[in-house]
C-alpha cells in the first residue's frame, strides 16, 4: 500500500512539474516561420546588442561602441529616431539597455551603468554614470528593468579568470539607491546544461515577461532560450528551432501584446530583428 501511495505521489509530482513547464512563457511560442517576421536592420545597427521596451510600448535598441539609443519600428524594421548620451557620444562596450519609467539605462560588459533621459532625434542628452564593480567578477551581457522595484537586473555571461564566483549570477542594481544590492541569484547552470545538452551556457540578453514576471534569457553561443522564475528557478530551456536565422542573438523583449522580439548582431551580414507571434492555440 505504501509503495502504491508513494508511486502515486511521484506521478502527481511529475505531472505538476510538467504542467508548470507547459504554463511557461516559452511554451506559447512555436518559433516557426509561420509565426514570425524578420527584418534586416540598417547598417548603423549592425552590432545591435540589446533591446528595451518603454512603458508606452515603443522599442529601443543600442549597439556596441557608442551610447547611441535607437527607437525602432518592429512592424517595419526601420529606425524612427536616434539620440545619444553626451555631446560627443560616450564610447564603451555596451551590452544592454533598459528603461525604468522615463529614464534610459545602458550597461557595459564591465557592469558600468549609464543613465539619462529620452532625447529627440539627433539630440545629445546629459547623463550620469555609475560603477557597479561587477566587472571584476564577471562579464556582463544583459540588462532588464524591474519597474515595480525601481531596479535593474544584470546577467553574467562569463566568469572572469581569478574570480571567486563559481556560478553565473543575476545582480540587482537599485535605481533609487544607485548601488548594487546584496541579493544576487545564482543561475541554475546544471539544470540548464542538462536540459539543453550542452557543456556551457553564456547569456547574451535578458528580459522580463510583463504578464508573468518570469525571466527570459537568450544565449547566442548556444542558440538557446531559457525561462526562469524571478527567484532563478528553471522553468524551461530550449534551442532556437530557427537557429540558422539567429547568427548572434543579443537582444530579447516581449511586448505588451505578446510579441517575442529577438535582435541579432550582423557580423559580416546585416543585423536582424525577428518578431514572433504566440501560438493561436
Image (cartoon, rainbow, N blue to C red):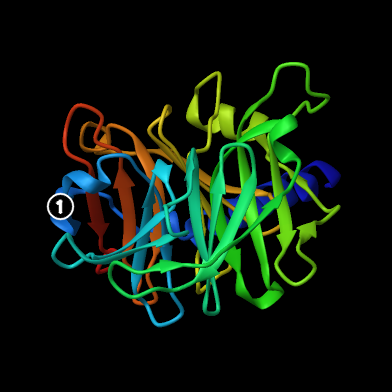
Marks counted in the figure total 1
Image: 140 above or below 41: above
Q: Depth check: give the residue in front, 152 or 229.
A: 152
Q: Residue at x 56, y 64 (%)?
A: 127
Quarter of the image that includes the C terminus: bottom left
Tell me where residue 198 appears, x and y as whole percent: 50, 22
Q: Please name the residue shown 28% across and 53% down the image.
A: 30
Q: In the image shown, does 70 or 7 lie closer to the viewer?
A: 70
Residue 214 visible in image: no
Say left or right for 280 vs 148.
left
User: Does residue 90 appear in this view?
Assistant: yes
Which residue is located at x 42 percent, y 27 percent? 221
Q: Residues within 10 Å of mark 1 (few under 14, many from 20)?
A: some
Residue 94: x %, y % from top left: 48, 44
- Which secondary structure, mark 1? strand
Question: Is 120 on the left-hand or right-hand side of 207?
Answer: left
Relative height, residue 79 to residue 143 (above, below): below
In the rendered structure, the answer to whether residue 112 lies left or right of residue 196 reads right
Q: Residue at x 78, y 26 (%)?
A: 166
Find disc 1 in the rendering and name its residue.
Answer: 39
Q: Nearer the viewer, residue 121 or 138?
A: 121
Instruction: Please identify the residue farthest to the front as the structure is shown.
Output: 87
Q: Position of residue 211 (x, y in %)?
A: 50, 74
Instruction: State left or right for residue 45 relative to residue 9.
Output: left
Please provide percent x and percent y for residue 105. Answer: 55, 61
Amino acid at each position: 500500500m505504501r509503495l502504491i501511495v508513494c508511486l502515486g505521489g511521484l506521478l502527481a509530482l511529475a505531472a505538476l512539474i510538467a504542467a508548470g513547464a507547459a504554463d511557461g512563457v516559452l511554451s506559447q511560442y512555436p518559433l516557426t516561420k509561420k509565426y514570425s517576421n524578420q527584418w534586416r536592420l540598417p547598417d548603423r545597427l549592425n552590432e545591435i546588442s540589446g533591446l528595451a521596451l518603454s512603458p508606452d510600448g515603443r522599442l529601443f535598441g543600442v549597439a556596441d561602441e557608442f551610447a547611441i539609443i535607437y527607437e525602432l519600428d518592429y512592424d517595419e524594421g526601420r529606425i524612427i529616431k536616434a539620440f545619444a548620451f553626451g555631446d560627443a557620444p560616450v564610447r564603451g562596450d555596451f551590452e544592454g539597455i533598459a528603461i525604468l519609467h522615463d529614464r534610459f539605462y545602458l550597461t557595459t560588459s564591465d557592469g558600468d551603468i549609464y543613465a539619462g533621459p529620452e532625447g529627440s532625434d539627433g539630440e545629445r542628452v546629459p547623463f550620469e554614470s555609475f560603477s557597479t564593480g561587477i566587472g571584476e567578477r564577471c562579464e556582463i551581457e544583459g540588462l532588464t528593468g524591474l519597474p515595480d522595484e525601481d531596479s535593474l537586473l544584470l546577467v553574467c555571461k562569463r566568469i572572469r579568470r581569478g574570480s571567486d564566483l563559481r556560478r553565473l549570477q543575476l545582480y540587482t542594481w537599485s535605481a533609487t539607491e544607485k548601488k548594487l544590492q546584496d541579493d544576487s541569484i545564482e543561475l541554475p547552470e546544471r539544470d540548464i546544461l542538462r536540459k539543453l545538452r550542452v557543456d556551457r551556457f553564456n547569456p547574451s540578453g535578458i528580459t522580463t515577461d510583463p504578464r508573468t514576471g518570469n525571466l527570459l534569457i537568450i544565449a547566442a553561443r548556444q542558440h538557446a532560450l531559457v525561462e526562469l522564475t524571478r527567484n532563478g528557478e528553471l522553468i524551461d530551456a530550449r534551442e532556437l528551432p530557427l537557429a540558422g536565422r539567429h547568427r548572434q542573438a543579443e537582444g530579447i523583449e516581449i511586448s505588451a501584446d505578446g510579441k517575442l522580439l529577438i535582435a541579432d548582431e550582423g557580423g559580416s551580414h546585416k543585423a536582424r530583428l525577428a518578431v514572433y507571434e504566440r501560438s493561436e492555440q
